Image (cartoon, rainbow, N blue to C red):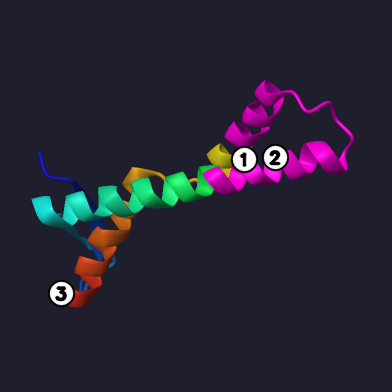
Amino acid sequence: MAFSKRYPKPTEGSVYPKWVEISLTEEEEKQAETEAREENIKLYRDSLHDAGKIVTEENLKPYQSDVVSIASSLFEKRASHLVYHKEKKCKEKLNTSN
């Protein structure tokens, strides 16, 4: 099933917007998934590195499980989720179709 997102589009002469549904092609969806995966791997590696720095700078005991736990928390805050990338792609299609 293709990813789709609905956006409001201003309607002339009405205060109510017309809703436009934008769907991604299979290729666009796969591209968004690939971009998200690559970005998430980079973000998690950066999070592991930053977690190690936090442990060192705060003089915490460098247990591997603690570093991974901190990295996971950082990653959750930083990671752009797959849906975000697909919504972004839909928004780009909407803006180029106007």
Residues marked 3 and 2 touching at CB (< 8 Å): no
Disc 1 + disc 2, Cβ < 8 Å? yes
Amino acid type at circle 2 is Ala
Write the residue at 61% across / 44% down: 47
Asked whether residue 80 is in view, the answer is no
Q: Was residue 82 drawn as part of the magenta stretch in this picture? A: no
Q: Secondary structure at mark 3?
A: helix
The secondary structure that dominates the magenta segment is: helix
Q: Identify the residue shown where x is 67% and y is 32%.
A: 70
Percent position (x, y) of residue 4?
18, 49
Q: Nearer the viewer, residue 18 or 7?
A: 7
Residue where numbered disc 3 is placed: 97
Q: At label 1, which amino acid type do we have?
A: Leu
Quarter placement of the C terminus: bottom left
Q: CA distance from mark 3 to mark 2?
A: 43 Å
In the image, residue 62 above or below residue 38: above
| Residue interval drawn in magenta | 45-73
User: Is residue 61 shown in magenta?
Assistant: yes
User: Which of labels 3 and 2 is toward the front?
Assistant: 2
The kind of residue tagged 3 is Ser
Q: Is residue 56 left or right of residue 23?
A: right
Q: Estimate how packed mark 3 is, as few (under 14), some (14 to 19) or many (20 or more) residues with alpha carbons within 10 Å.
A: few
Q: Which of the two discs, 3 and 1, labels the residue nearer the N terminus?
A: 1
Mark 3 and mark 1: Cα distance apart in space = 41 Å
Front position in the image: 3 or 19: 3
Residue at the disc numbered 2? 51
Whether pointer 3 and pointer 1 mark residues with C-beta atoms closer than 8 Å, the reply is no
According to the image, label 1 marks what residue? 48
Please tell me whether mark 3 or mark 1 is closer to you in this view: 1
